[in-house]
């Protein structure tokens, strides 16, 4: 099995990126993060990438530039780097059709709620304000909708009586750091099989 070449997309602090990189370093993920891409030049996750010696690139949308053209510029870099899979880790832009079609079932995302509940931004706050008793996080493949692709892994977190949106978000984030590296590991081991909307995790090779 070839070591998968991964691109991680971030916009902010990059804690999921770091959690995944930790597992790459330990060798539990049979992948290599070949590039970190950010739409935000000030993303703290970029600092981490530089310190870790990982190539990074900032892509800011130019005035008047279409989403397609913006992502075509990114695709060019991904092609050059022979990227096998894309890991969205807090990347705040909706991907273009082109990039999704170029990487079918090869783009993963983490969402801080139990999809299909509370898609979009501030999912932890949405769930908290709705008054649910359980929330959680979801790793899914990316399709053309917003947070609608086939679910790979989910983890449930109870909402406690003394929670606020922040304490809930903190507990969800801790679980994100566990399930996202796990899903990336399965992806890198070619163990994720998509059948319609369902994703099956094949057993590991002995
Ligand atoms: C996480 O809550 C993730 O679920 C969401 O964006 C946030 C990114 O956080 N998609 P970080 O940059 O990985 O720390």
Image (tube, helix red, strand yellow):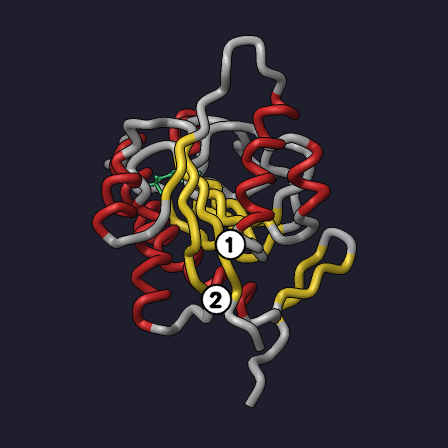
The single residue placed furthest to the top in the displayed view is 64
Q: Position of residue 111 (x, y in %)?
A: 48, 41
Residue 171 locus on image (x, y percent) = 30, 46
Asked which quadrant contains residue 96, the reply is top right
View quadrant of ligand 1: top left
Q: Give SS at disc 1.
A: strand
Tell me if residue 196 comes above or below residue 168 in the rendering.
Answer: below
Furthest toward the bottom, the residue is 206
Q: Residue 162, located in which quarter of the rendered image?
A: top left
Image location of residue 114, percent across then percent down: 51, 44
Say which element carries label 2: helix
Q: Residue at label 1? A: 154
Q: Quadrant of the N terminus?
A: bottom right
Asked if 28 appears above or below 184 in the picture, the reply is: below
In front of the other: label 1 or label 2? 2
Q: Whole-Å distance between the Cαs marked 1 and 2?
A: 15 Å
- Among all residues in the image, which is located at the extreme front? 80
Q: Is residue 66 above or below residue 16?
A: above
The quarter of the rendered structure image containing the C terminus is bottom right
Q: Which residue is mark 2?
A: 185
Q: Residues within 10 Å of mark 1 (few under 14, many from 20)?
A: many
Q: Is residue 127 visible?
A: no
The residue at the point 58 percent across, 15 percent down is: 65
* Residue 102: quarter of image: top right
Note whether residue 99 is visible.
yes
Residue occupying image coordinates x 50% and y 15%: 62
Question: Which residue: 30% across, 46% down?
Answer: 15
Q: Are marks 1 and 2 in contact (CB under 8 Å)?
A: no
Q: Name above or below for residue 165 compared with residue 15.
A: above
């Amino acid at each position: 099995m070839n070591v998968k070449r991964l691109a991680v997309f971030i916009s902010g602090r990059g804690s999921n990126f770091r959690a995944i990189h930790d597992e790459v370093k330990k060798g539990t993920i049979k992948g290599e993060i070949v590039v970190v891409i950010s739409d935000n030049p000030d993303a703290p996750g970029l600092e981490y990438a530089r310190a870790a010696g990982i190539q990074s690139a900032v892509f800011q949308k130019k005035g008047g530039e279409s989403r397609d053209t913006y992502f075509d510029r990114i695709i060019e870099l991904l092609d050059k780097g022979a990227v096998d899979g894309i890991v969205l880790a807090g990347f705040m832009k909706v991907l273009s059709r082109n990039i999704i079609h170029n990487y079918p079932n090869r783009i993963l995302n983490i969402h801080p709620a139990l999809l299909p509940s509370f898609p979009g931004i501030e999912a932890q706050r949405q769930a908290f304000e709705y008054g649910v008793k359980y929330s959680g996080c979801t790793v899914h493949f990316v399709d053309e909708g917003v947070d609608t692709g086939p679910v790979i892994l989910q983890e449930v977190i109870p909402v406690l009586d003394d929670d606020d949106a922040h304490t809930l978000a903190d507990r969800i984030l801790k679980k994100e750091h566990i399930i996202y590296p796990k899903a990336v590991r399965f992806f890198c081991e070619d163990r994720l099989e998509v059948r319609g909307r369902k994703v099956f995790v094949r057993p590991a090779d002995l």
